[in-house]
Image (cartoon, coloured by chain):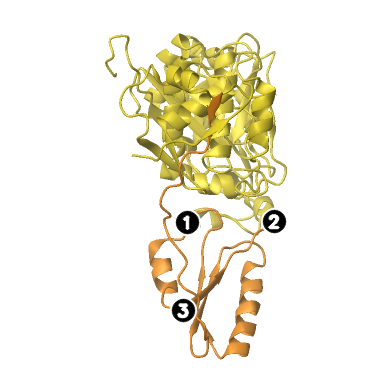
Chain colours: A orange, B yellow
């Protein structure tokens, strides 16, 4: 006998990742701090090390509420950077 | 138009066999499942009109497309009957409202679960329990509809523990969490109409914790009854403490509601009193939570000021639920979410929607 699978289709994604920059020298690094404890500290240190190793520079630092989507104006400012670091949980 | 749903071959429609077949693919809630055969799904869809494969909502984080057919499949799996499908469709519509913030609900480490409250005519005609033991167990409509909503979150939204659902401990309300409003014994009329949804039938979703009981056996004074609710609300142990714009749902039993109404108190009076009484010193809240989402004027309160656990009385939602006895409950919020109330679209025997 046959039964249905329960998942349904996957809809179009709201956003996709930009292609990764092969060379970071001279590029701008952004940080999106999601306000979780130590997220800004962790991402800031990682960004500093990345900048030191590659010749990129940290230019945009933004902070958002952990539980809500980032507002459009914040995303527009971050879009000025070629690389954005984000993602930190509890 | 969505793609046709995938079909699976299975040797038996025994609920244990369906559970095993699904579990091998990472599906199910751990309990036996009713086989979603085309015959059962068609019967589930018989009471609704239009294209069953048109999207009703897209559910994050998977961006899964919930059509009425997909909703019916999960309804069958959970043990729903065809008369429950309109409630389930409305519940999905409510969950997908942006103010509910379903992506956050599924992503958080908090044990939040959507409480589904059924209002109006369909609560009676489709057999939902608004009386004794309304939160369960024992009633098919409440149990199966709440379970189906969770199965939709697991399957369509991918709210699977450890991946799409990051809840640290999970919670029993994540199995099934559905109740009906006791409209017949509400002295204040229906909840849905009080928030501007004037339809014969409606549903509300409130994404919060499991209910916290409070009892008052001896008092007929509203203040004495409600001080106990306020005590449950004025706690550091809920997300309402660091998120001041969050809602509380206060589920009043008919006897407590009648005592308040007999003293001339309206639903708004109850909310205003609780807003006044459910307070903690602002300094205690600040000490407990470095990370806060408070209004600027609340941040300016001195440490010894008694601060309300929610910013405005409108955030205190009062619904009458339950049977005989003097037990009511408070349901705190996850925080960064708002409840949503939407009408249930019904199809009459003549085939007309209303």
From the viewer's perspective, tell me whether residue B183 is left or right of residue B23.
Answer: left
Task: For mark 2, name the chain.
Answer: B
From the viewer's perspective, tell me whether residue B161 is left or right of residue B349.
Answer: right
Residue sitting at 65 percent across and 13 percent down?
A: B138
Residue sitting at 66 percent across and 72 percent down?
A: A42
Task: For mark 1, name the chain.
Answer: A
Q: How many marks?
A: 3
Q: Which residue is mark 3?
A: A82
The picture places residue B113, in percent across and down from the top left corner, at 59, 36
Badge 1 crowding class, 10 Å Cα cut-off, few under 14, some 14 to 19, many 20 or more, is few
The picture places residue A34, in percent across and down from the top left corner, at 56, 63
Badge 2 crowding class, 10 Å Cα cut-off, few under 14, some 14 to 19, many 20 or more, is few
- Decide which of B317, B137 is in the foreground and name it: B137
Q: Are marks 2 and 3 on the same chain?
A: no
- Tell me if label 2 and label 3 are in contact, CB under 8 Å: no
Q: Quadrant of residue B171?
A: top right
- CA gap between label 3 and label 1 equals 21 Å
Q: Earlier in the sequence, mark 3 or mark 1?
A: 1
From the viewer's perspective, tell me whether residue A14 is left or right of residue B163.
Answer: left
The circle drawn on residue B287 is 2
Q: Quadrant of residue A15?
A: bottom left
- Tell me if label 1 and label 2 are in contact, CB under 8 Å: no
Residue sitting at 52 percent across and 85 percent down?
A: A24
- CA gap between label 1 and label 2 equals 27 Å
Residue B238 seen in render: yes
At mark 3, the secondary structure is loop
Q: Are marks 1 and 2 on the same chain?
A: no
Q: Which residue is mark 1?
A: A69
Q: Is residue B126 above or below residue B213?
A: above
- Decide which of A12, B211 is in the foreground and name it: A12
At mark 2, the secondary structure is helix
């Amino acid at each position: 006998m046959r039964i249905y699978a329960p998942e349904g289709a996957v809809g179009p994604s709201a956003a996709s990742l930009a292609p990764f920059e092969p060379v970071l020298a001279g590029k701008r690094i952004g940080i999106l701090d999601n306000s979780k404890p130590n997220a800004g500290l962790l991402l800031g240190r990682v960004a500093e090390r990345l900048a030191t190793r590659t010749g990129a520079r940290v230019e945009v630092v933004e902070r958002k509420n952990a539980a809500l989507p980032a507002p459009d104006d914040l995303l527009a400012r971050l879009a000025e950077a070629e690389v954005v670091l984000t993602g930190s949980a509890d | 138009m969505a793609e046709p749903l995938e079909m699976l071959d299975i040797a038996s429609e025994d609920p244990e066999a369906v559970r095993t077949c699904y579990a091998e693919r990472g599906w199910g809630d751990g309990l036996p499942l009713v086989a979603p055969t085309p015959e059962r799904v068609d019967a589930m869809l018989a009471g609704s009109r239009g294209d069953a494969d048109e999207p009703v909502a897209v559910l994050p984080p998977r961006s899964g497309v919930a059509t009425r057919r997909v909703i019916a499949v999960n309804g069958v799996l959970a043990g729903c009957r065809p008369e429950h499908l309109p409630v389930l469709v409305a519940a999905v519509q409510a969950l997908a409202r942006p103010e509910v913030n379903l992506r956050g609900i599924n992503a958080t480490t908090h044990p939040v679960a959507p409480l589904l409250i059924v209002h109006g005519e369909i609560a009676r005609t489709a057999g939902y329990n608004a009386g004794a033991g309304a939160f369960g167990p024992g009633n098919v409509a409440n149990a199966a509809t709440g379970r189906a909503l969770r199965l939709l979150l697991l399957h369509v939204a991918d709210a699977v523990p450890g991946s799409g659902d990051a809840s640290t401990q999970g919670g029993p309300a994540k199995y099934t969490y559905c109740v009906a409003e006791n409209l017949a014994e509400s002295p204040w009329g229906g909840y849905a109409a009080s928030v501007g949804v004037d339809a014969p039938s409606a549903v509300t979703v409130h994404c919060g914790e499991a209910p916290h009981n409070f009892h008052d056996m001896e008092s007929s004074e509203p203040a004495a009854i409600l001080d106990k609710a306020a005590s449950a609300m004025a706690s550091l142990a809920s997300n309402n403490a660091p998120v001041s714009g969050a809602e509380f749902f206060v589920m009043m039993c008919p006897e407590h509601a009648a005592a308040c109404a007999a003293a001339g108190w309206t639903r708004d009076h109850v909310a205003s009193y609780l807003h006044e009484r459910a307070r903690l010193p602002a300094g205690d809240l600040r000490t407990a939570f470095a990370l806060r989402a408070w209004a600027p004027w609340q941040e300016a309160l001195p440490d010894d000021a008694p601060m309300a656990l929610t910013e405005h009385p409108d955030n205190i939602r009062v619904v009458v639920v339950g049977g005989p006895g003097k037990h009511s409950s408070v349901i705190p919020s996850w925080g960064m979410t708002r409840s949503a109330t939407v009408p249930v679209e019904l199809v009459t025997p003549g085939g007309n929607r209303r």
